Image (cartoon, rainbow, N blue to C red):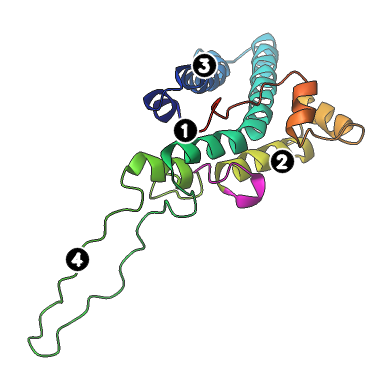
Amino acid sequence: MAELYRENGEPDRSTIASEWAKKLKDNCMVPVMAARKGVKTDEEKLEQKKLEEDSIFKAAAMFRELLLNLPFMSSAIQDFLSVDWHECKWDEPEGEEEIDEYTGLPVKKKKKKSSGGDTRIIELFWGPKARQDEGIRSGRVEDGGLPGILMNLLAAEKSSSSRSPTDYGQAMMAAASQVGLATSMAQAEKMGIKVNFKPGGSI
């Protein structure tokens, strides 16, 4: 996203997307680096748990911000690239080799070009070829891909899947019964979250 924004005259939004990537990596590395130093004493274990809780809390806040912004970002990128996310797909794997009935040799087929031309665009919307559930697609949770994965992570943290909820998860469970998630641009802006990732004018 950062590259595509930058190449299409949106340097400010490119910078924000780049900062997200760096922020997530830096955040996750804090408890990892602490664990690599060794956790033996009770005090060290307690400190490690606090670092993990803090990292989870920050990641969850970032995921919520991304979930609000991804639909606007996907729409903006589709607009300035003049593409439709549905059509930017990887080529379907070819079936069995067709044999010419007269020669007995494989029939040579013309190779199709990947739709969209630039494979970065296909990867953005549909994920790497081997992991096609990772793309941003429309940016909406109901269309799956990365937004669906992020929503599942938040839901699992609230309800706990394979481990006991963290302090953050317990707080989220309590808050979920009292406060609805912001589901519109207006609600998000009331919360002070920037969601305007659409270019200023039609491009």
- Type of the residue with mark 4: Lys
In this view, the residue in front, 197 or 172, is 197
Q: Residue shown at 75%/23% (left/top)?
A: 189
Image quarter of residue 113 = bottom left
Residue farthest along the bottom direction in this orientation: 102
Labels 4 and 2 touching (C-beta < 8 A): no
Q: Nearer the viewer, mark 3 or mark 1?
A: 1
Residue 110 is labelled as: 4
State yes or no: residue 203 in magenta: no
Residue 156 is labelled as: 2
Residue 7 is labelled as: none
Image quarter of residue 49 = top right
Give the alpha-carbon distance from disc 3 to disc 4, as whole Å: 46 Å
Left-right relation of 124 to 42: left
Query: Residue 156: where, in percent of width, then height?
Result: 71, 40
Q: Is residue 44 above or below residue 152?
A: above
Q: Residue shown at 50%/23% (left/top)?
A: 17
Return the disc, 1 or 2, that comes first in the chain's sequence. 2
Left-right relation of 193 to 84: right
Return the disc, 3 or 1, that comes first in the chain's sequence. 3
- Residue designated by label 3: 26
Image quarter of residue 120 = top left
- Residue designated by label 1: 203
- Type of the residue with mark 2: Ala
Identify the secondary structure beneath mark 1. Answer: loop
Return the disc, 3 or 4, that comes first in the chain's sequence. 3
* Magenta part of the chain: 135-144
Q: Residue shown at 44%/46% (left/top)?
A: 83
Rate crowding at label 4 as few (under 14), some (14 to 19) or many (20 or more) other CA atoms within 10 Å.
few
Q: Nearer the viewer, mark 3 or mark 4?
A: 4
Rate crowding at label 1 as few (under 14), some (14 to 19) or many (20 or more) other CA atoms within 10 Å.
few
Give the alpha-carbon distance from disc 3 to disc 1, as whole Å: 34 Å
